[in-house]
Image: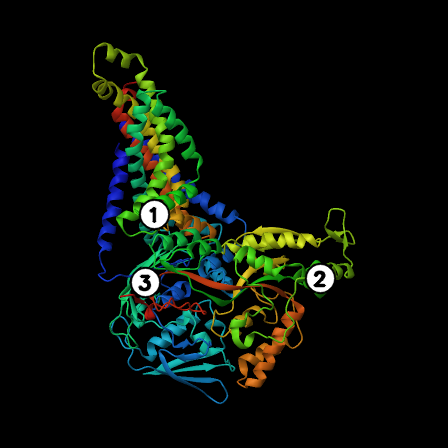
Amino acid sequence: MKSMKNLLIAAALGLASYASMAAEHQDKPVRIAAPFEIKGTDPALSGDILLRMDVVETLVEVNERAEPIPALAQSWQVSADGLNWQITLRDNVRFHDGSPLDAAAVVKSLNTARSKAGLLDKTPITAISGEGLRVTITLREPFTPLLSVLAESRSQILALASWDAQGNITRIIGSGPFILTSFQPPQSLAVKRFDDYWGEKPAIKAASYLSSGRAETRALLAESGDADYVFNLDAASRQRLARKPSLQLPSIPVPRTLMLKVNPGDTLLAEQPVREAISLAIDRNALAMAVLRYPGAASQLFPPNMGEWHNSALQPLQYNPQQATRQLQAAGWKMGADGVLARNGQRFSVTLLTFPDRPELPLMAMVIQQQLRKVGIEVKINSTNASEIPAQHHSNRLQLALFSRNFALTPDPTGTLLQDYAEKGGDWGAMNWHSAGFSTALHTLTQSTDAAERAQARNLITASLQQDLPVIPLAWYQQSAAINSKLKNVTLDPFERHFGLRHMEWEQ
Amino acid sequence: MMIKLLGWRLAQAVFVVLAVGLLTWFLVQALPGDMAWRIASGRYGYDRVDASAVARVQQELSGSLQQGSALLHWLYDLLQFNFGRSLVSGEPVMDELRWQLSQTLALAGTSLLLTILLTLPLGIWAGCHANGKLDRALFWLSALLKSVPHFALGMLLIVLLALQLDWLPSAGHGELRHFLLPSLTLALSLTAVGVRVVREATYQVVTSGYYRWGAQKGLAPATRLRRHGVRNLASPVLTWFGMQFVWLVEGVVVVETLFAWPGMGHALVHAIFARDVPVIQASAMALGLLFVLLNMLVDAGCYLLDPRGARA
């Protein structure tokens, strides 16, 4: 029985280490469960979780209209040529180790972020320097979405003691209203209230975070009362949990769109009428109701909650399979004996790539497969690793890809659009597609501060995406959560920046 | 004899280190999909991975992961158990492994303990009363339990014990009570087979000539089982338990994901998806060595239980 003994000793050691962690907090902590895995201390990897948990802060915050508002930066000024940004830091901020916020910490944090893959490394910055409470960012060319990039989680500001001698970030010393008490990648972390916080102090004293990749597990955590705030529910669980009086189930529209990426470089998909026929053949209402279980049919790429980016003047995308059939016939496609269209001996058979990380995607792919089959298009589904989509984009083998795209990676979607719809296309956007004036319009948005000029550029962008369909928008998302009814002042953040810990309160 | 046995197992351990190391190296290279893409997607998530992130990963990889002479260099590091840093998290692999292994061992240990507590009394009773009511009931019950996948069994237990009865937390880790549901899930599946093994071993013993002779010389059933039964049936049962470790690790992968448990099975699956070679190698090696160690302990246990092998 020696092998058993060995294991039992190991088990006992494991148990002992737990017992010591248990009774640390007196006041009831808010237990959060969400799908995001904690990867490590590097802000480029898990910075978003630390920002969501209010451990770290950025120079700039955003209000509900996605406008930049001061956070660690008290104010900012741009030179007339748009190349020089002067940022003045708040003078009453202390990091969790007691050190004051100064330009040195900001310069080090931002330069570290610039050295890694992200958005800051794509920003035309030539230098970041500073002294005392003033930071200067010098640009090669004007870049109006700069504040939006500075608000992104990877641009978080850490204290200088966070870096070790080799220049790696080994500790997370932020300035947020909560301080880390335990950090246990990949699954959990815990925070408590930081009493020297510069802003309004939160009501709750402590919180914990559990990463749980399975939507079913998260729903069960909410249902059994083992988590107070469960982020991101699957459709079936949401309907079930709605019947529980001990839970509140808020949901809000978020700037995330489900879309079908089309490769116009492929001979089958090169013609606009054919892409439009695919769009016409998909019943978006049925798709959204069947899989997402809320009315989320997309009539254009940008959902109405994206403010000025939603162009209400556009002709909405329609479901009209008869029209789809007519357009395919006009393009020379004839129904074959096997029920699949053919032209010059070539069958209309395409491969659709998707991935199961978001559980609704493979289901949606199957619904699309059936709907397109009705107009004679054969779809083969390949549900694989998410990285296969950008990889096949670059090897030019991709035909169709189904995924959802978050337009609020930065509060201002221009940054995301620059990545996705630039001249050469983008991994999660257009491919082999070029439209007159489109790139110029995008460029205008990064340079100009003139409201009329910007509006004109936006209209051109939204109209040409709707007309050419380099990606076919299918559905707009809603974010949902299951929250303990005793927890008050809980709001869902449409930009997915915060869980809202600093505003929460336990009902007395 | 014992020394020879240990020496043989030690040689096995060295072989495992080399074989697992080389196999993971070549197998990971042979997996479909571009490695740099997978690593970058593991690091930054599907919303943020793009070609420029991949280019950076490729740059890092070209320095550290080249075929040929690099393989020898890497083997040298390997023999010193120096796995370097994870390609995804950038943390030292040994630090990650130590934490995850302790979590998995704690879970596997609790499961084995529960299994033993369930299996031995039930199996011995069923073996002593072959074809009785309990024996027949157990036959069907174990077939049923074994055919339910871990994932479904775990869900059923959550629904029953966490939602309906509200006795245990549904998932999570950090406290003692979090152990029970995942280890019960594993233990029930193990017990399904274990009970049959113990029952068979017991049945073999109680129907043997020497055991019946024990009755003839007038020993009470309990005394007879203790004197002539336990040691004889212990040997096959111990061997079987030792082998279950491999199975436990397989089960742990699903159970850890379901119960949000920060263990090695969960980490290994993620590492394979993200092509995190150092983590895959270190985990595979730790599992391989554990297997050798357990076999060694089982051998030693069997040797102590049944020293006849030494005399032969």
**Residue found 43% across the figure and 48% down from its top:** B269
In the image, A1: left or right of A446? Answer: left
- Residue B206: image quadrant is top left
Farthest bottom residue?
A80
| Tag shown at residue A486 | 3
What crowding class fits label 1: few (fewer than 14 Cα within 10 Å), some (14-19), or many (20 or more)?
many
The kind of residue tagged 1 is Ala
Q: Nearer the viewer, mark 3 or mark 1?
A: 3
The reply to whether dot 1 and dot 2 touch (C-beta < 8 Å) is: no
Report, in whole angstroms, how far the alpha carbon at label 3 lies from the one at label 1.
20 Å
The kind of residue tagged 2 is Val
What crowding class fits label 2: few (fewer than 14 Cα within 10 Å), some (14-19), or many (20 or more)?
many
Considering the numbered disc 3 on the image, is that residue within a helix, a strand or a loop? loop
**Residue found 52% across the figure and 47% down from its top:** B30
Which residue position is annotated with label 1? B162
Q: Nearer the viewer, mark 1 or mark 2?
A: 1
Q: Chain of mark 2?
A: A
Q: Estimate the x, y position of residue A202 in percent, counting from the top left.
A: 29, 71
Q: How is the image coloured?
A: rainbow
| Tag shown at residue A274 | 2
Do discs 3 and 1 belong to a common subunit? no
